[in-house]
Image (cartoon, rainbow, N blue to C red):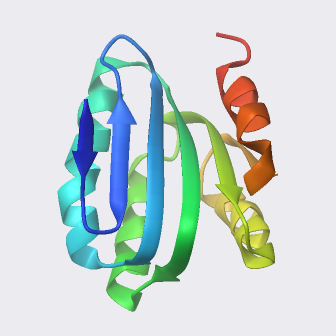
């Protein structure tokens, strides 16, 4: 199943606990209102989920979207087991560090050329 949003593409399979998200552009509050229910449906189906985030031409969040992201992180602090972030920009690596206080998940950053390593890491220990 693949769902396309203006800035977000989500791919997940009901028999797996791994969700792949491709983010591009600048995220808005409306984007969160559309994709959070998709993620939460997957969380209900699995004890813990793993998320691989692929940042492509990503420009960050609006202020309202950043607040939605914070609320999501607080609500699902323990529901994410691992999060791999794949991106090009140096600031995206900093984002991986910034996320750590908001989740119990193991968070790891990978450069764009390391997508295969990110996929291997996100599946480890299953």
Locate the C terminus by quadrant. Answer: top right
User: Which residue is at 31% across, 29% downward?
Assistant: 42
x, y percent for residue 69: 42, 67
Q: Is residue 59 left or right of residue 28?
A: right
Residue furthest toward the front?
A: 113
Q: Quadrant of residue 28?
A: bottom left
In screen coordinates, is 5 left or right of 114? Answer: left
Q: Is residue 92 above or below residue 40?
A: below
Q: Which quadrant is the N terminus positioned in?
A: top left
Q: Position of residue 104 (x, y in %)?
A: 64, 42
Report whether residue 111 is seen: no
Q: Is residue 32 above or below residue 117?
A: below
Q: Which one is in front, 90 or 81?
A: 90
Percent position of residue 6, x then y: 26, 68
Q: In percent of the image, x 46 and y 62: which residue is there? A: 23
Q: Which residue does the image show at 32% across and 41% down from the upper left?
A: 39
Q: Is residue 41 left or right of residue 105?
A: left
Q: Residue at x 35, y 59 (%)?
A: 8
Q: Count every numbered label the image shows and give the total.
A: 0
Q: Is residue 98 visible?
A: yes
């Amino acid at each position: 199943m693949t769902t396309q949003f203006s800035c977000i593409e989500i791919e997940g399979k009901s028999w797996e606990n791994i969700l792949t998200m491709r983010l591009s552009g600048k995220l808005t509050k409306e984007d969160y209102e559309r994709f959070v229910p998709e993620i939460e449906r997957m969380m209900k189906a699995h004890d813990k989920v793993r998320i691989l985030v692929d940042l492509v031409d990503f420009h960050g969040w609006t202020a309202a979207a950043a607040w939605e992201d914070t609320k999501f992180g607080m609500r699902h602090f323990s529901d994410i087991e691992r999060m791999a972030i794949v991106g090009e920009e140096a600031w995206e690596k900093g984002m991986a560090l910034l996320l750590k206080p908001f989740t119990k998940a193991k968070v790891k950053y990978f450069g764009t050329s390391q997508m295969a390593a990110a996929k291997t890491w996100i599946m480890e220990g299953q």
